[in-house]
Amino acid sequence: MEVESKYLSPGNDKIEKTLQRIGAVKTSEEEMEDIYYRHPVRDFGKTDEALRLRKMGDSSELTYKGPRMHMQHTKAREEITMKMENPLAMQRIVERLGFAEFMTIKKRRVNYIYDKIRIAVDDVDGLGEYVELELITEEPKRAERLIEQLRAELALSKMEPRTYLELTLQKAKD
């Protein structure tokens, strides 16, 4: 189970300095292209599911995200990910199965790890800067407490419950 919270960043430079001060370990920096797919017969918007192909250089991940379970400060959902070195082959398989490309979101991400919590410091094209805190666990309530402690340490106050896909769709409507 993935447990996560996303916040509008008060400034990615400020967040990264705080992460370094508290001893978080920077694990990577990467450019990502997330391609979201439309199911051939099911409306993922109504079922609160997603199928995403993430391209990062010469590697890719195909991720199914199940419906969200909302908790007080976080959200949890089933997430199944398969990694593959050839993004084009992965994209062709998905499309041959009848899925159609719905939307693409690009971002620059700096990844950190702190006490098993993964921190993503994102700059999302067209949306701005965000910070995601996530933990993979079998104990969502305990994970929520750990994430809340780190949120307070980073002085993150503007929670954003919507996904980048939902934010992009809302921005297109406005």
Image: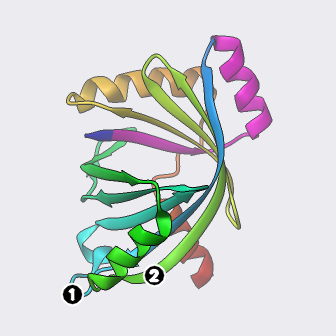
Occupied quadrant, residue 1: top left
**Mark 2 surroundings within 10 Å by alpha-carbon count, few (fewer than 14), some (14 through 19), many (20 or more):** few
Q: Which mark is residue 41?
A: 1
Residue drawn at (46%, 54%) of the image: 85
Residue 147 covered by magenta stretch: no
**What residue is pinned by disc 2?**
102
Quadrant for residue 21, please give it. top right
Q: Nearer the viewer, residue 137 or 155?
A: 137
Note whether 139 is above or below 53 in the view shown.
Answer: above
Q: From the viewer's perspective, is 134 left or right of 77?
A: right
Question: From the image, which quarter does the C terminus lie in?
Answer: bottom right
Give the residue displayed 29% in from the left and 50% down from the top.
Answer: 79
User: Amino acid under label 1?
Assistant: Val
Between 86 and 50, which is closer to the camera in this rendering? Answer: 86
| Residue in view at x 23 percent, y 71 percent | 47
Badge 1 marks a residue whose secondary structure is loop
x, y (%) of residue 139? 21, 27
At label 1, counting other C-alpha atoms closer than 10 Å, the crowd grade (few under 14, some 14-19, many 20 or more) is few
Q: Which residues are magenta?
A: 3-22
Q: Quick one: which residue is furthest to the right in this view? A: 13
Which residue corresponds to the image point at 66% horizontal and 22% vertical from the top-left? 19
Does 52 sit above or below residue 135? Answer: below
